[in-house]
Image (cartoon, rainbow, N blue to C red):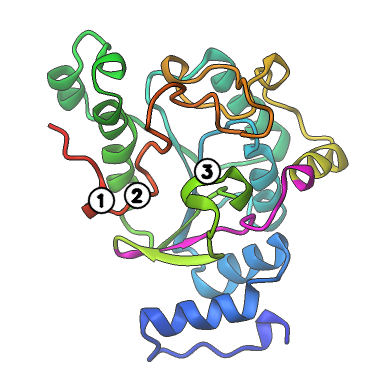
C-alpha cells in the first residue's frame, strides 16, 4: 500500500507509531521513506543534520528532490577541514538548498572549556560535547523529528539500525539505513554529484580535522575517525543517559 493511502491516527503512542512506520517502510526506498516523512508524518516539523562529509551529497540530493527548502542543520564546530566548508558551499549551490543553518558552539562555553582549542587532544569526548552535542540541542528546538545519514554498513552500534527510532524525545529517520557502500557510490555516479575533495586523499569518513585521518583499513569506512582510541561516535546518536559525563 502506498504511504499516502494510510491514514494517520492521532491517538498513536510513540511505540505504536514506530511499529507502524517500520512495518510499512522498513524495505522501502530512501526516496519513499523521505516523502512519507517530509510530506505526511512531520511536514514542516523535521530537519536534517548534515556533516557535509564524504557521503552527505547523497542524502542532500534526495532531500532536494522533495523539499529543497527544508531546514538543514550544519554543526559548525570551528574544527572542520577547509575543504569541508568549501564543499558545503558547492553542494548548497549545486542542489539549490535554500535553508541551511549553521549552528556554532556557545561562545562563553567554548571560552571557558577550551580557550586554547586543545580540548580535542586532552579530552575528545568533552570536545565533541562542547562543539557538537550541546549545540545540537537548541538547533533541534521546534522539531519533532530529524533525519540522519547513518547506514548499517558503517558497523559498530549502527549494525542493527532501524529506519525509524525514537531517542531523547524525538523521532529519528534513517532513510539510508540499508544502503551499502556500493549503493552510495553508484548513486553519486548516477546523479553526477560532486565528491568531497578529501575522499580521493584516502578519507572515506570525514569529521573535524584533529580527529580524522586517512583510513588504513579499506573494510572499515570509519577507521580514520578517532584512530587509536576506543571512541567511535561523537555522541550525537548516543542517548543522553549513556553519554560520558563531561564538564
Q: Separation of disc 2 and disc 3 at Cα?
A: 26 Å
Callout 2 environment at 10 Å: few (<14), some (14 to 19), or many (20+)?
A: some
In-image side of 97 versus 194 (left or right): left
Mark closer to the observer (1, 3): 1
Query: CB atoms at circles 1 and 2 under 8 Å apart?
Result: yes
Residue 230 position in % (x across, y down): 37, 31
Q: Which residue is mark 3?
A: 99
Alpha carbons under labels 1 and 2: distance apart: 6 Å
Residue 174 belongs to the span the image colors magenta:
yes
| Left or right placement of residue 55 versus residue 139 in this view | right
Work out whether 34 lies above or below 131: below
Name the element at disc 1. Answer: helix
Q: Which residues are magenta?
A: 169-183
Residue 102 shows in this picture = no
Label 3: few (<14), some or many (≥20) within 10 Å? few
Q: Which mark is residue 238?
A: 2
Q: Position of residue 86 (x, y in %)?
A: 60, 19
As drawn, 164 above or below 233: below
Q: CA distance from mark 1 to mark 3?
A: 32 Å
Tell me residue 42's x, y (percent): 49, 69
Amino acid at each position: 500500500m502506498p504511504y499516502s493511502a494510510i491514514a494517520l491516527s492521532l491517538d498513536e503512542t510513540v511505540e505504536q507509531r514506530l511499529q507502524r512506520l517500520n512495518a510499512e517502510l522498513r524495505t522501502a526506498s530512501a526516496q519513499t521513506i523521505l516523502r512519507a516523512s517530509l510530506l505526511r508524518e512531520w511536514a514542516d516539523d523535521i530537519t536534517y543534520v548534515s556533516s557535509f562529509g564524504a557521503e552527505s551529497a547523497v542524502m542532500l540530493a534526495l532531500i532536494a528532490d522533495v523539499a529543497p527548502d527544508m531546514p538543514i542543520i550544519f554543526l559548525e564546530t570551528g574544527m572542520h577541514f577547509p575543504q569541508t566548508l568549501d564543499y558545503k558551499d558547492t553542494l548548497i549551490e549545486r542542489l539549490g538548498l535554500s535553508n541551511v543553518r549553521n549552528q556554532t558552539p556557545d561562545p562563553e562555553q567554548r571560552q571557558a572549556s577550551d580557550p586554547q582549542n586543545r580540548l580535542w587532544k586532552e579530552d575528545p569526548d568533552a570536545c565533541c560535547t562542547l562543539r557538537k552535542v550541546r549545540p545540537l540541542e537548541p538547533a533541534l528546538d521546534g522539531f519533532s523529528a530529524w533525519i540522519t545519514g547513518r547506514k548499517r554498513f558503517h558497523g559498530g552500534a549502527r549494525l542493527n539500525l532501524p529506519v525509524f527510532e525514537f531517542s531523547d524525545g524525538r523521532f529519528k529517520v534513517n532513510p539510508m539505513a540499508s544502503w551499502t557502500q556500493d549503493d552510495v557510490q553508484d548513486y553519486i555516479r548516477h546523479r553526477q554529484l560532486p565528491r568531497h575533495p578529501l575522499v580521493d586523499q584516502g578519507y572515506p569518513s570525514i569529521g573535524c580535522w584533529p580527529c580524522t585521518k586517512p583510513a588504513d583499513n579499506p573494510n572499515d569506512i570509519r577507521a580514520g575517525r578517532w584512530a587509536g582510541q576506543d571512541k567511535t561516535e561523537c555522541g550525537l546518536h548516543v542517548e543522553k543517559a549513556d553519554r560520558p559525563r563531561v564538564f
